[in-house]
Amino acid sequence: MAQFIQELKRTHSCGALRGANVGEEVVLYGWVATRRDHGGVMFVDLRDREGITQIVFNPEINDKIHELAKVLRSEYVLGIKGKVERRPEGMQNSKLPTGEIEIKVSEFELFNSAKTPPFPIEDEIDVNEDLRLKYRYLDLRRPKMQKNLKVRHQVMQATRKYLDHQGFLEIETPMLAKSTPEGARDYLVPSRIYPGKFFALPQSPQLFKQLLMVSGMERYMQITKCFRDEDLRADRQPEFTQIDLEMSFVSREDVISIMEGLVKEIWKAGAGIDLKMPFPRLSYQESIARYGLDAPDTRFDLELQEITEVFKNTQFKVFANVVAKGGIIKAIKIEKGADFSRSEIDELEKQTAIYGAKGMAWIKVLPNEWQSPIVKFFSDDEKKLLESKLSMKEGNLVVFCADKPKVVNDALGNLREFLGTKLNLIDASQLNFVWVVDFPMFDYDEAEKRHVAVHHPFTSAKPEDLSLLDLEPLKAKADAYDLVLNGNEIGGGSIRIHSMEVQKKVFKLLGIEEEEAREKFGFLLEALDFGAPPHGGIAFGLDRIVMLLTRTDSIRDVIAFPKTQKAVCPMTEAPSEVAAKQLLELGIKLNKQN
């Protein structure tokens, strides 16, 4: 094995050479992707992050070099020197950008050998994700993964460039902060210097970016890590990346306008797509009414329809009990759903059960009858009203949920998206952006008997709804906005509270008494009392944006070193135990349970 020889200087990447380079002498570096020995002449596909070039070891050109090259195997690292030649007629590869040329090797240096990898270094592999993450440095050699990270880089560069032109300052905020209630559990960092006290890793830079507005920075941005110790879920990461922004002296319309410009630049840089502006808008109420969810996929119809009024006087006890308790009844009409088998209908019911529905009623519209376990309980008037309300026709399948509004909307909203995939109703090439606005400021938690913030405690009510905070807080709308793409929330933000008195009022509505507010948020409240400007902002999920740009199925495929679904790193084996000495220094004693 040779040492790295400086005289062999790279002239091109493995994806750069074309027919116009024929006749040039070049030097390439890379990894052996494949090796094919054709009984004398040896062909090697040399790979780097920019592509693949075919190189040829021919004994007629240099017998010694050809003999030495016989040691080459998959993932060996080498540098080669040779002449660019056009491939023979009929031997060109139209699938490769470099497919019309090859390099006749005159010199090479073997920089390193390699063990046989645990899986092939190629895109179309069927391998367990945990194994890929254990050998992530090998997984990242695959062209698809390198392309994903390149797109991520392009998005970050486009973001910085656009926001710089818009007058934003990139300002870092602390990673070691105070633990404050922001919706999820904090990751805590014990302090050695102050035993028994802890820093928290930030769930977001929310409070710091608001303080920067009080500081007169006017426009702040940061591409930053955030940390949330949340319950495990398929596509969650304990650490994730936000494009974080805040602006002074702005309205909702200002924020939306500037952010649409940012998203346009991101899609141009990451996918070469020129988006049309402005994006449509949906109120929260309309989104829930039509789609059941506040992050709807609007690429297909199959909308929810409320039919509570049809059954307001029904004798069907299940529906009657729901209506009497203030619940609602909604339906989805599936045009050709009458062909569904009973097992397929059972599958739909299982989907609604995931989201809390206690059951799902259904009707098949057949040539001369309605087939259903429940239709016998309907009066003739109810049947006529239902048929008219839903425009029911032969071949339809209608499915119903009746329960509390949240249960019905969650169950049918998610069932709608399941059906969109199952019935191939979604055009994957479409990009349907939509702003969801006019969220309620609060929900009411029946279990805890208190209001909870729909976004976060620092969100302002719309100016015309501020007076409702005193008398009817549940009617107040938040000056908030989420950007949704194809059913994925990719960003969310709001105009913030800039008055200390209003902030204290909101804390009280949320059950945070003055003493607790002072203890946890005293620095913010004091800052607001020193002349805070009106301000607002937004945060975009960078990982999710890149996932959508690259059309991958998981955010783990666009993060260099992600954790698994169980929040562990198979490569480094983190989290791991630490030495007893370290724990002693921190004043921590573990209570190990069997």
Image (cartoon, rainbow, N blue to C red):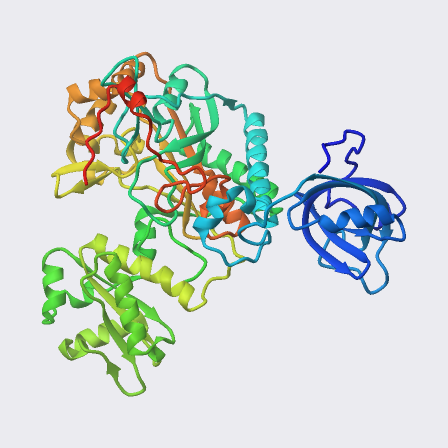
From the viewer's perspective, tell me whether residue 149 is left or right of residue 422: right
Work out whether residue 160 or residue 184 is closer to the camera in this orientation and state it. Answer: 184
Split into 4 quadrants, where in the image is the N terminus?
A: top right
- What residue appears at the point 49 percent right and 56 percent down from the top-left corner? 127
Res. 29 in view = yes
x and y, in percent, of residue 552 in the image: 50, 51
Work out whether residue 83 or residue 241 is closer to the camera in this orientation and state it. Answer: 83
x and y, in percent, of residue 186 in the image: 29, 31
From the viewer's perspective, tell me whether residue 91 is left or right of residue 349: right
Split into 4 quadrants, where in the image is the C terminus?
A: top left
- What residue appears at the point 27 percent right and 41 percent down from the top-left corner? 440
Work out whether residue 96 or residue 47 is closer to the camera in this orientation and state it. Answer: 47
From the viewer's perspective, tell me whether residue 181 is left or right of residue 550: left
x and y, in percent, of residue 131 in the image: 46, 50
- What residue appears at the point 75 percent right and 51 percent down from the top-left corner? 70
From the viewer's perspective, tell me whether residue 343 is left or right of residue 472: right
Q: Relative to 367, is 164 above or below?
A: above
Work out whether residue 20 or residue 510 is closer to the camera in this orientation and state it. Answer: 20
Image mark count: 0
